[in-house]
């Protein structure tokens, strides 16, 4: 029966430094897979060496989601008899090829699994991988395979070549049973447990248990124990769900460790342990495996399937025969892996710092192979798909070399990988000062080495004596490349260690050794570009820490006088910067402007450098960047005003067609106290319509007066009151009294100014006589100059000042917004009313006196009192029209007498209501 074949990659024409071909030797949810080198030549070759000469039945290839090959060709290789099994002696036969989709329909968020049915014999399998599909995520023209699976039957020449006789005997029992014909003994039957998708989704420990249960189920069917087989089937189905769920817990635990949230990691670990024990108890896994051995003389050791995970209560015998004492997990050696005839325990594993070494995943390898290659676990469906080229992984580094057998657990074991020539040239100054061993750790692929190297540099620099300034300067220059590399590091712990080292240098090291200002400038100029780039990182905590550190640097006593931070931050970028990075840069400039301002000449910020930055940022394609920049421009205009406009496009109709510029310029108008152009147009149209309506009303009312003067109708007070336009309503403090009318009107006297026929040139409110008081002139006088009138601030109507309070409370469109104060009798806006009443700071109104709503003072009662207060030399200081009226020549003769009495002389029967 075909089953999964063990193999090892023996040749690859090229590979990425991080995604090596050896990754294909193992199947697990966290397998990173193989990727070709950047800008490689095609086709690329991968040769797989099978453990034994086999008959291949099925080949499975899981492609990368972005680095997708256009075509993959398959070749099977065999070695002629009598020749050593070696790659050079292989003879290849072409089997065919498969084409892969470009993956655009899924948005590069799914991986394609290709399964090919074949029938070929050989010991080698060669994959010929052709050029890549072009997409925006594959910027280096790479191809990648996440996993390769080979299913087939080893070719056995005789019983002497069979190593695992027990397993062979069990298989033969099933295959040779006639009752099982058409079930497990079909030559084309492939178990779903050997499929590549099973290993890529399942927790490895659960997967091994499921495989054991599957074998038990086959034996139960052979022995006609159908009830037992039914229970096994149900348990297998449940365990497949459990395996996926435990894988999710494992992912959450690893992410918590990466985030240094050890409380959460501890909680997830406890949940996993408890969940495993509970499931094994609920499903009676030890009983189903018959590990207590009442029915099976052969002991099936469940412990042998366990990976190095926390201890679990799996051995639950029905009658415990005094089990051996269990040692704590940290002191227990790795559980034994089944060899082909006997069980041999492996050596304890070597632990990386913080116990973060990934767990080993088994792929039917020998114990040495299983201990050599290790890979962290994550459920396949939970593995995040990155936007860029590589699959996101936890910040837990792997060591590719196996740990020595006698290595004790705990601590860093072995040495970091040696430096390449390029790294040695780059870090030559650091090697001279700190030594090659420490710098090798700083450049290591293991994050714990990199962190330890930075901490060692921190300690050395702190302990350096202050006597030798030259040595201190050389050590400072040697540490800069290490800090730059740490700031750019993707592992958060290393990044934080780099920030800690840089902060110590700026706040302690430089002042302690009294280094020059140029050393501080050099340190900031070298590291600040890396900090600015880190402020656009995809991880939020990296962005926030980088920005906060920049803010802190800007205010440090040693750094602030150099003005390096603001000068570097406000440099306009070239081209179209990435949106996240551009937004962070704009936010940094905004915060620096709020912190430092531009008034201080030592802040490093000026209108010129800020506006040069903002002009470039306002042209960015991202709306988020433009919004932050607009806030900077608005705040700057509010502080300095007109100079900001010198850097912006001209304020004209063409520019205002752009929404962003229109909103900016309207904000500028608002700050300047000007109405916006749209408001001006609307108000102008409304004023013109209102003015035309008022003119029409005045003309009609004046015509009525002329008709009355000609004797066409009796003259009464209501007719004269109607001379005031409807727009200019007045109200009396008490009801109007109807006067008595003379039976006849006096005849027209051209020399009598008080005659009703000569009232066209007199204002009936202030008594001013002016030849320009025609219909339009009188209207203009009411609107702008009459000292007895004012325009309402809400409805824009012209009303008498004496009745302004009553207008606000009873007639105005905004009367609902006012309330009357019983103390001063004025109209107070409702938001201020409670505070106004509570404070009692207003000038109280007195009986038998008028109260002015403009200056809030009391004055003499009656209409003469109002005229003296609003028009007199020592009158109301808050009446802007009073001085204009005083500057005019007073009327002479009878007209003056009429003005002094407040009503036209000669219309003796038309009395105004006394005030």
Image: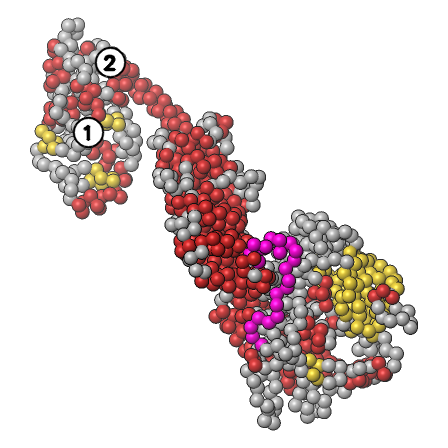
The residue at the point 76 percent across, 61 percent down is 12
Residue at the top extreme of this rendering: 750
Q: Please say if 548 is above or below 360.
A: above
Q: Please say if 234 is above or below 425.
A: below
Q: Residues within 10 Å of mark 1 (few under 14, many from 20)?
A: few
- In magenta, the rendered stretch is 409-431
* Marked residue nearer the N-terminal end (1 or 2): 2
The residue at the point 88 percent across, 64 percent down is 91
Q: Mark 2 — residue?
A: 773
Residue 471, x across and y down, in percent: 48, 55
Kind of element beneath mark 1: loop
Residue 781, x across and y down, in percent: 25, 18
The residue at the point 37 percent across, 34 percent down is 640
Residue 790 is drawn in which quadrant? top left
Nearer-the-camera pick, 347 or 683: 347
Residue 878 disc label: 1
Nearer-the-camera pick, 701 or 694: 694
Q: Is residue 908 visible?
A: yes
């Amino acid at each position: 029966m075909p089953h999964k074949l063990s193999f090892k990659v023996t040749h690859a024409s090229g590979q990425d430094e991080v995604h090596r071909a050896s990754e294909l030797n193992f199947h697990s949810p966290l397998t990173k897979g193989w990727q070709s080198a950047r800008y490689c030549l095609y086709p690329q070759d991968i040769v797989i060496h099978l453990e034994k000469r086999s008959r291949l039945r099925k080949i499975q290839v899981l492609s990368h989601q972005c680095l997708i090959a256009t075509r993959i060709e398959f070749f099977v290789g065999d070695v002629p008899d009598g020749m050593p099994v070696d790659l050079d002696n292989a003879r290849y036969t072409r089997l065919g090829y498969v084409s892969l989709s470009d993956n655009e329909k899924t948005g590069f968020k799914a991986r394609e699994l290709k399964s090919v049915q074949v029938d070929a014999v050989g010991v080698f399998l060669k994959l010929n991988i052709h050029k890549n599909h072009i997409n925006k995520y594959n910027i280096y023209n790479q191809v990648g395979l996440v996993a390769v699976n080979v299913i087939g039957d080893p070719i056995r020449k005789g019983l002497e070549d069979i190593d695992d006789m027990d397993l062979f005997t069990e298989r033969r029992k099933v295959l040779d049973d006639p009752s099982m014909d058409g079930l497990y003994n079909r030559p084309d039957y492939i178990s779903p447990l050997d499929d590549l998708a099973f290993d890529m989704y399942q927790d490895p420990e659960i997967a091994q248990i499921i495989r054991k249960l599957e074998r038990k189920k086959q034996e139960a069917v052979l022995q006609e124990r159908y009830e037992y087989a039914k229970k096994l089937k149900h348990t297998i189905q449940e365990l497949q769900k459990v395996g996926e769920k435990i894988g999710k817990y494992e992912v959450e635990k690893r992410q918590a460790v990466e985030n240094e949230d050890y409380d959460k990691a501890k909680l997830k670990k406890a949940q996993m342990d408890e969940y495993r024990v509970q499931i094994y108890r609920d499903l009676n896994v030890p009983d189903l495996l018959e590990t207590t051995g009442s029915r099976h003389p052969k002991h099936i050791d469940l412990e042998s399937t366990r990976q190095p995970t926390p201890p679990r209560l799996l051995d639950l015998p029905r009658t415990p025969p005094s089990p051996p004492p269990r040692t704590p997990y940290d002191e227990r050696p790795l559980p034994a892996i089944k060899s082909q005839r006997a069980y041999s325990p492996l050596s304890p594993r070597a632990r990386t710092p913080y116990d973060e070494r990934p767990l080993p995943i088994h792929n039917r390898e020998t114990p040495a192979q299983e201990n050599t290659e290790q890979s962290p676990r994550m459920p396949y469906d939970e593995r995040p798909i990155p936007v860029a080229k590589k699959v996101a992984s936890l910040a837990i580094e792997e060591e590719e070399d196996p740990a020595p057998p006698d290595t004790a657990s705990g601590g860093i074991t072995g040495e970091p990988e040696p430096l390449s020539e390029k790294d040695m040239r780059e870090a030559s100054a650091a090697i001279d000062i700190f030594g090659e061993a420490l710098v090798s750790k700083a450049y290591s692929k293991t994050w714990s080495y990199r962190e330890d190297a930075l901490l060692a540099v921190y300690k050395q620099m702190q302990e350096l004596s202050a006597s030798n300034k030259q040595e201190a300067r050389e050590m400072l220059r040697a540490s800069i490349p290490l800090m730059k590399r740490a700031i750019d590091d993707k592992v958060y712990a290393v990044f934080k260690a780099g920030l800690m080292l840089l902060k110590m240098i700026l706040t302690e090291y430089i002042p302690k050794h009294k280094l020059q200002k140029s050393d501080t400038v050099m340190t900031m100029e070298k590291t600040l570009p890396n900090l600015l780039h880190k402020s656009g990182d995809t991880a939020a905590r990296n962005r926030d820490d980088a920005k906060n550190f920049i803010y802190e640097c800007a205010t440090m006593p040693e750094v602030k006088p150099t003005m390096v931070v603001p000068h570097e931050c406000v440099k306009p970028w070239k081209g179209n910067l990435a949106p996240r990075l551009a937004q962070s840069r704009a936010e940094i400039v905004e915060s620096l402007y709020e912190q430092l301002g531009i008034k201080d000449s030592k802040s490093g910020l000026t209108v010129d450098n800020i506006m040069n930055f903002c002009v470039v940022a306002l042209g960015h394609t991202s709306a988020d960047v433009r919004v932050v920049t607009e806030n900077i421009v608005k705040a700057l205009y509010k502080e300095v005003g007109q100079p900001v406009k010198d850097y912006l496009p001209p304020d004209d109709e063409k520019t205002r067609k752009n929404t962003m510029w229109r909103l900016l310029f309207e904000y500028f108008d608002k700050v300047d106290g000007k109405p916006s152009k749209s408001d001006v147009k609307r108000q102008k149209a409304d004023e013109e319509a209102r003015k035309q309506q008022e003119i029409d009303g005045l003309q009609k009312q004046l015509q009525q007066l002329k008709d009355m003067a000609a004797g066409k109708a009796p003259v009464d007070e209501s007719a004269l009151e109607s001379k005031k336009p409807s727009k200019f309503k007045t109200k009396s403090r008490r009801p109007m009294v109807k006067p008595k009318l003379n039976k006849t009107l006096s005849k027209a006297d051209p020399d009598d100014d008080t005659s009703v026929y000569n009232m066209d040139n007199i204002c009936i409110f202030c008594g001013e006589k002016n030849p320009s008081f025609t219909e339009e002139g009188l209207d203009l006088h009411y609107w702008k100059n009459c000292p007895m009138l004012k325009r309402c601030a809400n409805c824009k109507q012209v009303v008498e000042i004496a009745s302004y309070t009553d207008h606000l409370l009873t007639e105005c469109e905004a009367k609902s917004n006012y309330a009357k104060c019983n103390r001063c009798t004025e109209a107070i806006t409702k938001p201020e009313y409670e505070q106004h009443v509570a404070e009692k700071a207003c000038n109280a109104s007195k009986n038998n006196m008028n109260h002015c709503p403009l200056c809030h003072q009391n004055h003499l009662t009656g209409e003469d009192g109002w005229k003296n207060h609003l028009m007199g030399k020592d009158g109301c200081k808050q009446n802007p029209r009073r001085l204009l009226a005083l500057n005019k020549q007073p009327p002479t003769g009878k007209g003056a007498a009429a003005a002094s009495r407040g009503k036209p002389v000669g219309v003796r029967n038309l009395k105004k209501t006394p005030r």
